[in-house]
Image (spheres, helix red, strand yellow):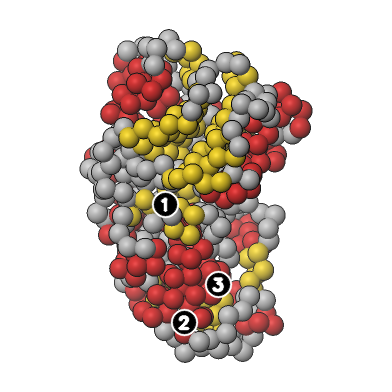
Amino acid sequence: MILDDDKLHEECGVIGIYDPNSIDTALMCYYGLIALQHRGQESAGISANNDGVITTYKAMGLVTEVFAKPVLDLLKGNMAIGHVRYSTMGDSAVCNAQPITVHGKCGDIVVAHNGNIINAASLRSELEKTGVTFESTNDSEVIAKLIARYCEDDLLVAIKQTMNRIRGAYSLVVMSADKIVGVRDPNGFRPLIIGKKADSYMVASESCALDALGYTVVCDVEPGEIVLIDKKQMNVIKNRKHNGKTLCLFEYIYFARPDSVIDGRSVYAARIQAGIQLAREHPAKADIVIGVPDSGLQAGYGYASEIGIPYSVGFVKNRYIARTFIKPDQQSREISVSLKLNPIAEVVRGKRVVMVDDSIVRGTTSKRTIKALRDAGASEIHVRVASPLVVCPCYFGIDTPRKNELIAANEVLKRIQERLGADSLGYISVAGIEKAVGGSGHCLACFNGKYPMKIPKNISKEVLQ
């Protein structure tokens, strides 16, 4: 179950490393996955390639829990790919952990996927009718089985054919006996970036993983591009004309680490600008501004700097609680919120407080956080939100509640304020957040219901009710 149940949750993070001068690429993937741990905490996996022999280890848990030294000692080779997962399609179970290995005419193929394929159900049914069997319930295995099906003797051709069949969001890292391939969907929903260090190349979901391992950014993988890395070269292939970049705006608002740079834009700077824009749209008379950790901190600082109110650290966050947590009853849910986030009474007592959060989805955790501030002595609480109102589900790799669970889809602003227990409430506008992150070219469907592609009816019926 989800501890931070007032937030959207991403699916996963991917990484791939080729280094002709080292057999410890799996160890480097391990460190890179730690840097990407924020993208998924349910399971972790690494596949290592030693002269064409691919060995995979994956299990439920955080990266440091899954990979002890004896396991890493068994994963040797000059190529490796890795994955951290948060499930949006398929159960939270080890059978759905990645990377996924499939066997085809061109040998073993291993796939790690970040995103969500909206026509996965129909493709799976089509494959099953031809005798293809599945070991998992996720859409990533559908991608892997399609690649294996099309792979006669050329992996690149198989990937291109697969891209012609699948619809939705996907940043992929694929490994065969002799190469690593990075793929970004034609809409560019999820980020993917290339790094270089000496003779070694790396692809990863975020630049923070490159930074951690000392790789220099080469470029972002553009929508529809394929990156081929083998012992001969690193080659970027313009495979599909992109459909107009629609990067998920929540990468900047919430998902990505603030030290990452996505499509040339600093996540940290975007969050600061969001706070500045939020202050211009919804100023408040108050004594201090505090940000809700972690993603609200930068927006809070930007808000305070723009409006001229002191910025303070108002919460202590327990760093030892991951985003997933078992909560068997209501009492445990209440305790879990306090365990994760606790206000500093000395900071807020007797003060008119502006509380800046990155987003509000269901409203449940926000309500408890506001109550905690009241109990700590805050005299007024003015809530400001650095994302627009979330009114529609996402189908492109985010674990979004059903529409009837989205507070902004079912209540007017004044009623939301009353339910949260805030003295005032303001959300940044869609135009404001676009300005903060640098103009157009983003998916805004969760804010306005305008999806970049047609959604299958069976998905709509399942999620929108």
Q: Earlier in the sequence, mark 2 or mark 1?
A: 1
Between the residue at mark 3 and the residue at mark 2, the CA separation in whole angstroms equals 14 Å
Q: Is the Cβ of the residue at disc 3 closer than 8 Å to that at disc 2?
A: no
Separation (CA) of disc 3 from disc 1: 26 Å
Q: Are marks 2 and 1 in contact (CB under 8 Å)?
A: no
91 or 120: nearer the viewer: 120
Circle 2 Cα neighbour tier, 10 Å, few/some/many (<14 / 14–19 / ≥20): some
- Sort mark 1 into few (<14), some (14-19) or many (20+) by Cα contacts within 10 Å: some
Please name the residue that numbered disc 3 is placed on. 291
> At 61% from the left edge and 16% from the top edge, which residue is drawn?
51
Q: CA distance from mark 2 to mark 1?
A: 26 Å
Residue 429 in percent (x, y) is at 33, 70
Provide the residue designation for mark 1. 263
Q: Considering the numbered disc 3 on the image, is that residue within a helix, a strand or a loop?
A: strand
Q: Are marks 3 and 1 in contact (CB under 8 Å)?
A: no
Q: Amino acid at mark 1?
A: Asp
Q: Amino acid at mark 3?
A: Gly
Amino acid type, mark 2: Glu
Q: Point out residue 145 in the picture as x, y percentages from the top left corner.
A: 41, 21
Q: Which residue is mark 2?
A: 306
Residue found at x 59% / y 19%: 54
Q: Is residue 367 visible?
A: no
- First in sequence, mark 3 or 2: give its number: 3
Q: Secondary structure at mark 2?
A: helix
- Around disc 3, counting alpha carbons within 10 Å, would you say few (fewer than 14), some (14 to 19), or many (20 or more)? many
Q: Give the residue drawn at x 44%, y 12%.
A: 106
- Residue 221: where, in percent of width, then height? 41, 42
Question: Is residue 266 toward the left or the right of residue 372 in the image?
Answer: left
Instruction: Give the percent coordinates (x, y) of residue 337.
Output: 61, 62
Give whichever of discs 3 and 1 has the lower sequence position.
Answer: 1
Classify residue 269 as left or right of residue 33.
left
- Toward the viewer: 231 or 42? 231
